[in-house]
């Protein structure tokens, strides 16, 4: 597996991954051409040095997963830097094959290189398998993840 | 109450708020002079246009609360922008007086102005009163908030 930063050419495939998911298909619009909102989102992410939108390729250079790593500086925890993982999506036919484990091994290593104090994520309670996976990796479910949609 | 962006002069008072808390006192070091890590954290936050480190003043220009609002762009949710609230801390003698409500009224208004799709936060399960407060405001505890400390 190869990890690299996403480029503009990857946008359609990234959105395809999100749309091919029971929760995601209600949220995304996978039309051709793609709604411009996705290009605008990509450009904003790409221009922000604290964001890393990643894709994972297999040996055939197919994108089999995506995730986004954000670095956020806070005053508390002794002025600690945090890394936050979001939008982790593995292609349907690639699940259960260890891709998620490889992504998080990479992410934990990356967070340590960046001297991150806390690595964090929120996981939908409708995805109990994902939550168990994160617990096995060493994440503690110490917090409630609270959302307000507008 | 007056809301304004924090400045370098506010750092000691901000850290004082965090340190005067059952969870925070284990995490912070309120020495004089303050450890440089806090100044470095402030500078990184202040230089990032997606971060708003705020202080709330009373009529005597005393800082009675602080919080940080982060804007994070994602590809999913139709390329939706999120706002994330962290490090909300109200001065001990000011709790239960509606300061938190005023902070969140301000934050929700601000998030809407910025066309945010999701406003989110995580709250420590050791703070059940805070979690109830957020639920009353309209936050849904749909996610597990998972942390890994290094």
Image (tube, coloured by chain):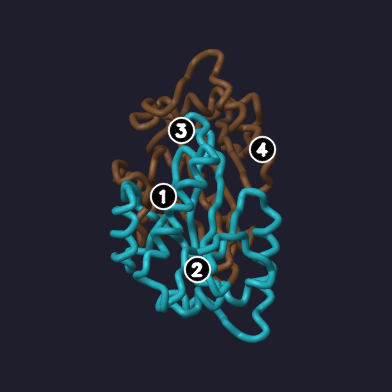
Chain colours: A brown, B cyan
Q: Residue furthest front?
A: B59
Question: Which chain hosts label 3?
Answer: B
The residue positioned farthest toward the top in the image shown:
A32
Name the residue carrying label 1: A122
Q: Is residue A142 above or below residue A9?
A: below
> Where is mark 4, residue-wise?
A46
- Distance CA(mark 2)–CA(mark 4): 33 Å
Helix, strand or loop at mark 1: strand
What is the CA distance from the residue labelled 4 to the residue labelled 1? 22 Å
On screen, residue B36 above or below A45: below
Would you place residue B64 above or below residue A10 in this image? Answer: below
The residue carrying mark 2 is B65
Q: What residue is shown at x 58% (from left), y 30% (from top)?
A: A59
Residue occupied by mark 3? B77
Spatial CA distance of label 4 from label 3 is 17 Å
Quadrant where the C terminus of chain A is found in the figure = top left
Q: Are marks 4 and 1 in contact (CB under 8 Å)?
A: no
Where on the picture, by quarter, is residue A46? top right
Name the quadrant of the N terminus of chain A: top right
Q: Nearer the viewer, mark 4 or mark 3?
A: 3
Residue farthest bottom in this picture:
B32
Q: Residue at x 39, y 52 (%)?
A: A134
Q: Secondary structure at mark 4?
A: helix
Label 3: element kind:
helix
């Amino acid at each position: 597996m190869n990890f690299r930063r996403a480029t503009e050419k990857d946008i359609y495939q990234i959105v395809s991954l999100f749309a091919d998911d029971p929760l995601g298909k209600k949220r995304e619009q996978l039309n051709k051409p793609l709604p411009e909102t996705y290009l605008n989102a990509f450009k904003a992410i790409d221009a922000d040095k604290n964001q890393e939108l990643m894709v994972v390729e297999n040996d055939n250079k197919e994108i089999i997963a995506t995730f986004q790593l954000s670095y956020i500086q806070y005053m508390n925890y002794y002025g600690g830097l945090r890394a936050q993982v979001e939008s982790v999506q593995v292609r349907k036919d690639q699940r259960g094959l260890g891709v998620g484990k490889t992504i998080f091994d990479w992410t934990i290593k990356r967070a340590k290189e960046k001297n991150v104090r806390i690595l964090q994520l929120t996981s939908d309670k409708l995805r109990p398998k994902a939550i168990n996976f994160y617990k096995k990796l060493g994440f503690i479910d110490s917090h409630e993840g609270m959302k307000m949609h507008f």
